[in-house]
Image (spheres, rainbow, N blue to C red):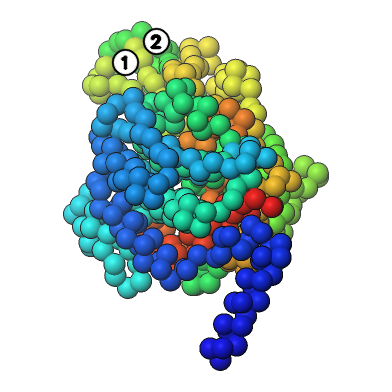
Amino acid sequence: MRDVRLGGVLIAVVVAALGGGARAQSPAPDWRAVEEETLRHYQALLRLDTSNPPGNESIAAQYIKDVFDREGIPAQIVASDPKRANVVARLTGNGRKRPLLIMGHTDVVTVDPAKWTFPPFSATRDGGYVYGRGAVDDKDNLAAALMTMILLKRGNVPLDRDVVFVAEAGEEGSTNVGIDFLVKEHFSELDAEYCLAEGGGVARKGGSVAYATVQTLEKVPRRIELVAGGVAGHGSVPLKTNPVVHLAGAVARVGEWRPPIRLNETTAAYFRRLADISPPDAAKHYRDVLSSDPAVQKAADDWLFENEPRHSSMLRTSASPNIITAGYRYNVIPSQATATVDVRLLPDENQDAFLEQIRKVVNDPSVEVRYPTAATRPGGREARLDSEAFRAIEAAVTRVYDTVTVPTMGTGATDMAQLRGKGVQCFGIGPAADIEDGPRGFGAHSDQERLLESELHRFVRFNWDVVTSLAKAK
Ligand SMILES: [Zn+2]
């Protein structure tokens, strides 16, 4: 057997010498060795406490920079705050195509250590999982991108485009030190045709893969304030102008209003593909919501709102009143009452026109309706489903996970928004996780966080597959 295999290798070498070219110069990585190394970096990153606030991401930035320095990968640390550094690294290609950016964030949300079975920054391995804050948000993407850079460099893989790596600080609510700073001060180093970051994943149900989601677009977060004003008075003498009463009415009307349905390329494809892989009763609702018959669409929308509210939010700009501030003594009629509404706009929504619509819904001149702050995330264009990148991702999903790819519009916000605002086509990807794990309290931002080791390793292979499909010289 040994001789036969040796013969096979020899034939491969001869074929390569006769013109196999690029492929032979960069053989597939030795995945077993890669797994040990992946786990080492992943655990090391999880053990760095980068809770934001305060962040302190420079400890992770320095770790990554040291790894790249050892590998001979050109990398620089860029920071607006020395404690909150970012890393930008680049492998240079022949320039035939515009760069590919692979990105992860180094900060994590804060923890309540009392809620954790294993200490949150211990990266403990148990039962096939690795536990730690950041395990699925976002040190998984970070470790996979890091490994892809290392493997490209070691394999001396010839590239048709530069591959740019970014480890960014401040994704969890302090984008001023991370993506905003990077886009403002260093965009020429980040500029790319395509970007891969967090926001997607592979759903496992009952232990087996069900489908993969790729985020190609996200909603734009904005808050609206409703401010009711009146004259203060004694509670024993009810007033027609009582701001609490006016605000309560306004909040109820906004809460009950469902803005009109508007689909885009991503959400239309999402519901179509979801229908294809769902049981008949659920599939009916996903198909009906795409119907051109308003009555059919309305019935499906009603069902989704009650049973799958995330899907209802994907259909429209949404408005959820979440804070009410009114009154301070039971016998005093206050002169002001305020409500804050969490609005998630469709990326192409006209924000001024939407505010005007809310005013009409409130329909009360004593209630002022306003945006209290400027928009923090721009609304960018959706990443194209007919792009080379989406096709490469879809093919890699088939090869690595043997499942269907479903493009999604995120109802939440990610740092891809700032890049999309600059014209980069961004795709959110992620490892496979059991959908049962979130409700059990092991998901992103939960009281505990974990990832299956086997899925971390599969995600590295997926990352490698996508990046080499897009960047390796043809
Ligand atoms: Zn994240």
Amino acid on which the number 1 mark rests in the picture: Pro
190 relative to 384 in the view: left or right: left
* Secondary structure of the residue carrying numbered label 2: loop
Task: Give 2 or 301, whichever is nearer the viewer.
Answer: 2
Outermost residue toward the bottom in this view: 1
Which residue shows up at 47% across the image and 18% down it?
374
Which residue shows up at 72% across the image and 54% down it?
272
Task: Give 390 or 89, whichever is nearer the viewer.
Answer: 89
Relative to 93, say whether 442 is above or below: below
384 relative to 238 in the view: left or right: right
Relative to 394, say whether 13 is above or below: below
* Secondary structure of the residue carrying numbered label 1: loop
The image position of residue 163, as x and y in percent, is 54, 43
25 relative to 337 in the view: left or right: right
Task: Give 398 or 380, whichever is nearer the viewer.
Answer: 398
Residue 89 visible: yes
How far apart marks 1 and 2 lie (CA) works out to 8 Å
- Residue at image mark 2: 230
The image position of residue 76, as x and y in percent, is 38, 35
Indicate the quadrant containing the N terminus: top left, top right, bottom left or bottom right. bottom right
Crowd band around label 2 with a 10 angstrom C-alpha radius: few (<14), some (14–19), many (20+): some
- Residue at image mark 1: 334
Do residues under tags 1 and 2 come within 8 Å of each other at their CB atoms?
yes
Amino acid on which the number 2 mark rests in the picture: Gly
State the image quarter where residue 441 is shown. Answer: bottom left
The image position of residue 370, as x and y in percent, is 49, 16
